Amino acid sequence: MKKILYGIDFGTTNSALSIYDEEKKEILTTILIPSLIYFPETSASEGSLNYIVGETAIDAYLEDGMKGRFIKSIKQILSRSSFTETRIQNKRYNASQLVALILKELKTRADQFIGQSCTKAVIGRPVFFDDDNTSKDTLAQTRLNKAAELAGFDQVRFQFEPIGAAFAYEKTLTKKEHVLVADLGGGTTDFTYVILDPNKTGNIDRKEDLVASGGIYIGGDSFDSAFMWEKGTPYFGKYTQYEATPGKVLTVPKSLFANICSWDKMNFFNGLKIKKEIEDYYYFSGNDPKFKNLITLIDHNLGYSVFQSIEKTKVELSFQDHSCFEYSNMNIDIKEEVDIAEYDRIIDKDLQKIAHYMTEFLQKNNIQESAIDSLFLTGGTSLVPAIQKLFKSKFPHIKVNSGDNFTSVAKGLAYSSYLFEDGY
Ligand SMILES: Nc1ncnc2c1ncn2[C@@H]1O[C@H](COP(=O)(O)OP(=O)(O)OP(=O)(O)O)[C@@H](O)[C@H]1O
Ligand SMILES: [Mg+2]
């Protein structure tokens, strides 16, 4: 039996597992999957509940005409005390049970790769699961720990995700450096300020090198929400007017549309009362076709596919100056040209929050800009040009490195085996 440890980055959008050979002190491979679960709609007579995790979940969900239950950004429910369980075809799932499905998928694939079962893992966690709330944070880690146990892990340690990213970056260095690491993911942006030294990777005496860590609950999902609000909601009736009382015309409440701007809020429309309200607005708007789009979106569960188009637009704008946000389905026809300047404006509020947090982080921890040797940007959202511009303008004299956007955290977690040694 080989001595193996898994480094697991359970992410909002993507999850990765690095297989680390503890004797050879090297990573054998890294497995990456989207953090998605799909429960197809099966009738009771078809027997046991089946589900699909990872890349094939999207295709199966779309092929099935978006029926069944599709679960995305599940990490965000870990810190929500209001979420206790969800019922999927008469079976109850709590947060840990759902997360365990993703961890188990990663474990199964990795176990197959090494030809044995590994039950030892360093699992990443954001610096804050929720904005600075200790009880929510504890709840989230407890749930994640339980999920790991359900997935078959019996030796588990936690490590901050940006420290994972830092350790992966450390492997690329040739000399000691003071580094500010920013990991910009789907759900959160995490910072860590560390002293990296390639001769120390995996050593037990790292406590003093990990100077400060912090984070904010903003990531690529927030950009997609802002985009939906600006460019998507007008197609779903944000400006629809209706006759509230005879002769009195009002615009439908804007607050309604906040619920189609983030994936997790879509369930808001499941209640009977709200369904009736929506129907009333539609009737008293004189059957406004744009408002009809909202009803179609809700009734046919189109949220995920609309957000896929939004993400595609964002990704294109990381490589070119123009893109078109297009969506055409069930009489909903969206076509919006977007250029990079407009996109930057749409995400500006979130960018300012990230910038403000970063300044605060440096001040609070007494980190002088002159002491920073380099920056390391990682995570999918670090590919957004405005993010790169932000860092370059904040630190004009510091070298900005980026890369390994989707696997750096898992790799660095795998280099954190020292957490199992005495003294930790
Ligand atoms: N080329 C790209 N340009 C811009 N954004 C991108 C690109 N590729 C991916 N993204 C975005 O990056 C995010 C996913 O990044 P990543 O996999 O690092 O997040 P995560 O680890 O799952 O999330 P978290 O760390 O917050 O839990 C998504 O919001 C995705 O839309
Ligand atoms: Mg991440």
Image: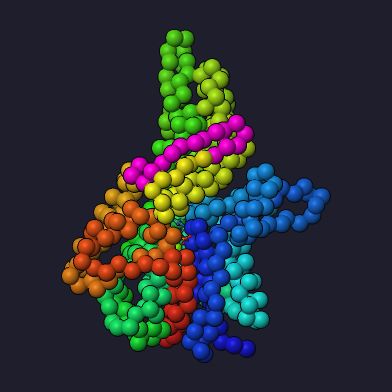
Q: Nearer the viewer, residue 338 or 406?
A: 338
For the magenta stretch, what is the residue range?
Answer: 327-343
Asked which colour scheme the image uses, the reply is rainbow
In the image, residue 238 lies at what x, y percent? 45, 29
Residue beneath the point at 52% across and 90% down: 23
Q: Is residue 337 magenta?
A: yes
Q: Is residue 331 above or below residue 302?
A: above
Residue 208 seen in the current view: no
| The C terminus sits in image quarter | bottom left
Q: Is residue 291 above or below residue 372?
A: above
Q: Nearer the viewer, residue 225 or 331?
A: 331
In the image, residue 290 lies at what x, y percent? 52, 27
Residue beneath the point at 55% across and 77% down: 29
In the image, residue 87 lies at what x, y percent? 64, 49
In the image, residue 104 lies at what x, y percent? 61, 67
| The N terminus sits in image quarter | bottom right
Query: Which quarter is ligand 1 in?
Result: bottom left
Q: Is residue 107 above or below residue 206?
A: above
Residue beneath the point at 47% across and 9% down: 246
Secondary structure mostly seen in magenta is strand
Q: Which quadrant of the view contains residue 126?
A: bottom left
